[in-house]
Amino acid sequence: MTTIAARMASAGMAPGPSGTVWRRMARYRFNALKSDPTTVAVARLEIVGAGVGAGESAGTEGAGAESAEAGADRGKVLARSAALARDLANNPPGHLMAAEYADFTAEQGPSFGLSVETFGLAELIDMGCGGLLGVNAGSFEEPRLIILRYVPEGEPTAHLALVGKGIMYDSGGISLKPPDPMHLAMKMDIAGSAAIMAAMTGLRDLGVTAAVSAWLVCTDNMPSGTATKLGDVLTARNGTTVEVKNTDAEGCLVMMDALSLAMEESPDAIVDAATLTGAAMAALGTLVGAVIGNDQPLVEQIKTAGAASGESIWQLPLETRYRKQLDSDIADISNMGGPTAGAITAALFLSEFVKGTPWAHLDISGTMKSDSNDS
């Protein structure tokens, strides 16, 4: 068992096959690193109801109970996945670097019906993933690309691609972040990939009929003598050249490689999740996530899912008139726009790598962290 898996198991949080009981959402606490946690995990949950649903006759008492049981089973899977995403995001960077994350995913993935491939530094060089390599250039830790695949029984009804930003710790690189409490939260720059990885673990148990593939791009972003510099030009997996105008806009750089790889498989749709911009948090605060996309029916599905799950989501426009802010004098595009509309210009950057495919982008910078019960 990997180090992270052992820590999570000791706190009753380790992933396991279908039926494993996890602490439920309201009782969630990250206690894996406390020597004497004071919280008490849920040992038993009873659902009490009339047993006859609306419109049911006295002869169908079992139908209401079966519906409640099915709902409880679904809730267990969703709570399990959410807890895993939170565990990954809450781990300190020194306890969860890209290589360890990849090992953890490869070890745990098969128990959820997932196949897992991981790619290290040498392979990423061969693959031409210049964005991920450029962000990793200042780090002592190697990067990882993690690919997870779920294939349902029978003929898949569609192929969905998921992409997650996995910055294990974001110092800002050469564009160093200011010395404020934001630094402490930057272990949560993994949150996009954590959400995608955790979602993948629930697909089999929820009976999803589509094939789903996920690309997680993982590295920390550190300043050093080898770090990418302002004005450097990186080449994405698909050949696009990118001028780096801000090393703290590293999310766009790692995501462009993952989106390019996803596009090579011609999926029916792509959804990405990333703690991408402070501008999204400035606009929507910490309770509402942003969604931007090039396909309104796909965006509407995400908004509907958000409403059903209690996750507040607000659509921002993919305003193409801002695209000129990303122009570069020496490369195909730059990774930074102007002083305003940052969430939109970052989405416009990503949209350059998904042309022709329905795509939706979730900017979860504001919602990655909550210090209180906001329900």
Image (cartoon, rainbow, N blue to C red):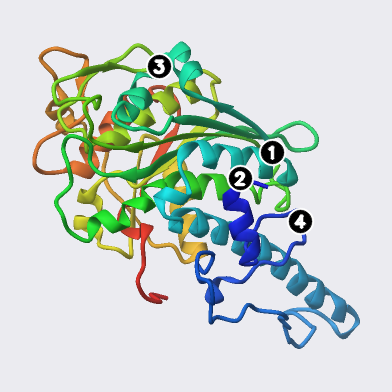
Q: Which amino acid does label 1 sit on?
A: Leu
Q: Name the residue under label 1.
A: 114
- Residue 287: image x %, image y %? 33, 65
What mark, if any, has residue 244 been given in the picture?
A: none
Q: Do the residues labelled 1 and 3 touch (CB within 8 Å)?
A: no
Q: What residue type is labelled 2?
A: Met
Packing grade of label 2 (10 A; few <14, some 14-19, many >=20) is many
Q: Are marks 1 and 2 in contact (CB under 8 Å)?
A: yes
Query: Is residue 235 toward the left or the right of residue 34 in the image?
Result: left
Q: What distance separates the C-alpha of mark 4 from that of mark 3?
A: 36 Å
Q: From this viewpoint, is residue 364 visible?
A: no
Q: Observer-nearest residue: 133 or 296?
A: 133
Q: What distance separates the C-alpha of mark 1 from that of mark 3?
A: 25 Å
Disc nearer the start of the sequence (2/4):
4
Please tell me which residue is depicted at 67% across the width and 41% down the height of the picture: 107
Q: What distance separates the C-alpha of mark 1 from that of mark 2?
A: 8 Å
Q: What distance separates the C-alpha of mark 1 from that of mark 4?
A: 13 Å
- Residue 21: image x %, image y %? 72, 67
Q: Name the residue under label 2.
A: 200
Which quadrant of the view contains residue 332?
A: top left
Please tell me which residue is depicted at 41% across the width and 39% down the height of the picture: 165
Q: Which amino acid does label 4 sit on?
A: Ser
Q: What residue type is labelled 3?
A: Arg
Q: Name the residue under label 4.
A: 18
Disc nearer the start of the sequence (2/3):
2
Helix or strand or loop: what does disc 3 sit on? loop
Helix or strand or loop: what does disc 1 sit on? loop
Q: Mark 3 points at which residue?
A: 237
Disc nearer the start of the sequence (1/4):
4
Q: Locate the C terminus and report the quarter of the image it occupies.
A: bottom left
